[in-house]
Image (cartoon, rainbow, N blue to C red):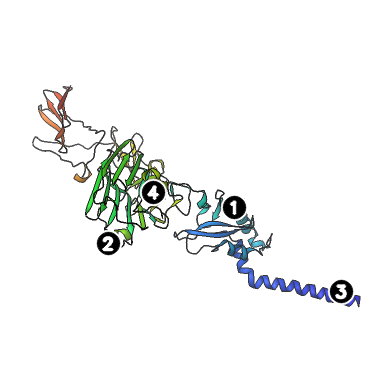
Amino acid sequence: MLGCSRYKYSVFFLTTVVFLVESVSSEDTNSFLACLAPFSRGPCTEYSHRWFYNVTSRTCQIFSYGGCDGQNVFETEEECRRTCAKVPLEPKVSESTSASAKSNKSRLPAASKNDSTAPAAAATDSHAGPVLLPVPVGARGIELTFAETGRQTTFMMAQTNAFIQLDGNRIPTFQLRLCREISFQFRTRLPHGLLVYHSVKDRPEGLDPYALYVIVEKGQLKVVHVFGKHSTSVTVGEGLNRDKWHSVMVRINVHGAKLIARVDNITTETVITGLNQNTNYGVTSDLTSVVLIGGLSPEEKLHGVKYIIESFIGCIKDMVLSAGKAASDLLPIKPLIATKHDHVEEGCIDKCRTPENLCFYGSHCVNHYERLSCDCFGTPYEGELCDIYTATVLTLRGASYVSYRVYDWKDRVHSSHNRISVQFKTRFDNSALFYASGESPRHHHVAVSLVNQSVVIELDLGTHSEETRQQCNQR
């Protein structure tokens, strides 16, 4: 009887083991494989937060999912925990796959003590190599960041269709009826470009069209406030297209109907026309805002923008949006996370510090963000890369001349310095070598001529003329 009991017990035990093995192999094999695989964001770029299973720490961690394909991807933390709860501590693998599995396991990130607030850990993306997990929302500051990273507050626009968009659900307090402030820093080499655009989506019936433009125009900062048929603008600063960082603050005080703009340490303000003295915009409820940075999205272009301006090429950083019932009670929106973006790179990349810089030694590399150029001034070289040891020689006979347009009329800007270099030889005296002129705001010119065996330089910047002479070498 005792032996029979042992036999029955042994059979029951073996049956149980077989049942468990069958259950795992038929029902959970695919889940186990998903949990053990290195997580992947996939090739798409419609980023959103998903969860992956970290086999090393046996925890579920958040990461930025591209939106398609990918592996080891779960919709929620609960789904990840439920699916991967039965994963063995040391999963057995075949000899042919043990090396790769061990390699993938060693690259997975360790768990943080508090996933909701601790800095994001490093992880492995099978498509892009080692990546960093996004900074948790609660750990972000008041400066604009991207949802999928949260690490950079500096952004580079190097294409004409680049933009960053903030929709109303990300900026709920940035309301038309409240006082508003926009602050940021920028740098660029171009004289024109859209920095910030603010408007209202789903405008209610009876509300006049509204838009706010913060732009670079002719190397100056220009702020344009449009409300109905009324347009108010203010211009401040100059020479803002010399590739240096400039601080900007734009504030709308709805109670005093004031538009205030500041660039670096220069501030100017004006009265906003079209606002009602008592009701301002005539709005008492919240409206859905949209803010675009660096350029317009395709949707906004279709809505018929009043003020046409080119996209911004350069870098923008430390973007902060604030709002409040009074100008003295403005509160920054925190966290400020972009809804979407296109053709924007994090950081501010100097192409002259990359392998793309092939400028010949002695020349000067100029970073244009979307490209670079080589400045050969002062060197005996020419060419796109300043690598051609030659000189362009022109033979002029009395009435002949060469004209050159420095820039288009719309691109005329204030310049801090101008450079002119020329070599010549002649057997004749009393002749013109060079002449350059401008008409705005007053006539001004630079003239270089040869008079009595001397080079005469005449300079008139619109106030009075100055002249200097340099004796020529008579040989």
Separation of residues labelled 2 and 4 (CA atoms): 24 Å
Give the answer, above or below, for where 328 lies relative to 455: below
- Structural crowding at the residue carrying mark 3, measured as other residues with C-alpha within 10 Å and reported as few (<14), some (14–19) or many (≥20): few
Identify which amino acid the numbered label 4 is placed on.
Answer: Ala
Relative to 137, 457 lies left or right: left
What residue appears at the point 78 percent right and 73 percent down from the top-left corner? 14
Mark 3 — residue?
A: 6
Identify which amino acid the numbered label 2 is placed on.
Answer: Gly
Identify which amino acid the numbered label 1 is placed on.
Answer: Pro
For label 1, the SS is: loop
Mark 1 — residue?
A: 109
Q: In this view of the protein, which residue sits in the foreground, 224 or 196?
A: 224
Relative to 325, 378 lies left or right: left
- Structural crowding at the residue carrying mark 4, measured as other residues with C-alpha within 10 Å and reported as few (<14), some (14–19) or many (≥20): many
Q: Which mark is residue 323?
A: 4
Question: Which one is closest to the eye, mark 4 or mark 3?
Answer: 4
Separation of residues labelled 2 and 1 (CA atoms): 55 Å
Mark 2 or mark 4, which has the lower sequence index? 2
Instruction: Give the image location of residue 22, x and y in percent.
Output: 69, 73
Instruction: Give the image location of residue 403, x and y in percent.
Output: 15, 40
Relative to 344, 240 lies left or right: left
What residue appears at the point 85 percent right and 76 percent down from the top-left corner? 7
Q: Quadrant of residue 343?
A: bottom left
Separation of residues labelled 1 and 3 (CA atoms): 48 Å
